[in-house]
Image (tube, rainbow, N blue to C red):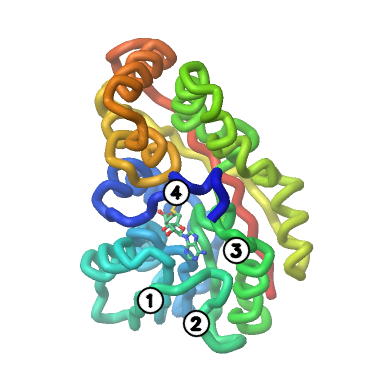
Amino acid sequence: MTSTARHDTWSAGEHYERYMGRWSRQIATRYLDWLDAPRDAAWLDLGCGTGALTQTILARAAPRSIVAIDQSAGFVAHARAAISDRHVRMRFEVADAQKIPLDDASVDVAASALVINFVPDRVQALREMKRVVKPGGLISFYVWDYAGGGMGFMTAFWKAAIALDPKAEELGEGRRFPFCTADGLKALAAEAGWPAVTLAPIQIEARFSSFEDYWQPFTLGAGPAPGYCVSLPEDKRAALKARLKQEVGGDGPVSFVARAWALKAHA
Ligand SMILES: C[S@@+](CC[C@H](N)C(=O)[O-])C[C@H]1O[C@@H](n2cnc3c(N)ncnc32)[C@H](O)[C@@H]1O
């Protein structure tokens, strides 16, 4: 693990749901509308986490089967307990995106939601996605537009954190994932041997009912910013909370853009 990844905590499903799952479910819906995958397909959900995309595939894409894998045993257990469909063959497995436990050309659609930037060798993960898709099948992923400031609620958090602790600068996703731009992601796909990709921005509004609703998930430790937040001693965490409240304008409701870049190609 690199030092900037030291707060990337992926384990407690409930906490992830509070911090990110509620938004990743919404973006998954928009994404599937854009992806326009065939019905009755065999799917791979790479880096399924607590199952935001898996569940949305079930609800909207009429799949024949889904293999959902993630490196986090806690998230896989959460997804397995939460998701079932007696009409669809489902398999949840703890595995590394860099070594997908599937045969060559064994799925119709390989999709990955908000994961690829976290994988140490992302080109290898994209090669693996291409390997497991049948000829003519769909390979696709999306990641937050960190580099373009498209993840407003994280940008505000890191701005407040850096104002109090300049060392936090290297931990912000915008700094860590500079390739999360249209050109950077296309270059990544090309490096992994993907054929010509279609790329699109996909956006939702992340609306919090109050400052507390916004702040509380940072205190649960699931994800890079929450991981950093819980690593702080109590007094520093209180100072960060006060600074962030000032940054977003007080106690009232607060709303941010949450924008992802989505890519797809036919293998
Ligand atoms: C931001 S979460 C996205 C989860 C889910 N796809 C969603 O949309 O909510 C990132 C996920 O990537 C997983 N992950 C990170 N590196 C991984 C790797 N090398 N192999 C498999 N999963 C990985 C984490 O465990 C975590 O569940």
* Tag 4–tag 3 contact (CB < 8 Å): no
Question: First in sequence: mark 4 or mark 2?
Answer: 4
* Within-10-Å neighbours for mark 3: few <14, some 14–19, many 20+: many
* Within-10-Å neighbours for mark 4: few <14, some 14–19, many 20+: some
Quote the CA–CA distance across marks 3 and 1: 20 Å
User: Regarding mark 4 in the picture, which secondary structure is present there?
Assistant: loop
Compared across the picture, whether 151 is left or right of 88 comes to right
Q: Position of residue 8 (x, y in %)?
A: 45, 48
Task: State the residue position of label 1.
Answer: 93
* Tag 1–tag 2 contact (CB < 8 Å): yes
Instruction: Report the amino acid beneath label 3.
Output: Ser
Residue at the image point whose x is 59% and y is 35% from the top: 170
* Tag 3–tag 1 contact (CB < 8 Å): no
Compared across the picture, whether 247 is left or right of 121 comes to left
Task: State the residue position of label 2.
Answer: 101
* Tag 1–tag 4 contact (CB < 8 Å): no
In the rendered structure, find residue 140 and report the number of the disc placed on it. 3
Instruction: Between label 1 and label 4, give the one nearer the viewer.
Output: 4
* Within-10-Å neighbours for mark 2: few <14, some 14–19, many 20+: some
Question: First in sequence: mark 1 or mark 4?
Answer: 4
Residue at the image point whose x is 66% and y is 69% from the top: 124
Residue at the image point whose x is 47% and y is 32% from the top: 154
Instruction: Report the amino acid beneath label 1.
Output: Glu
Task: State the residue position of label 4.
Answer: 8
Question: First in sequence: mark 4 or mark 3?
Answer: 4
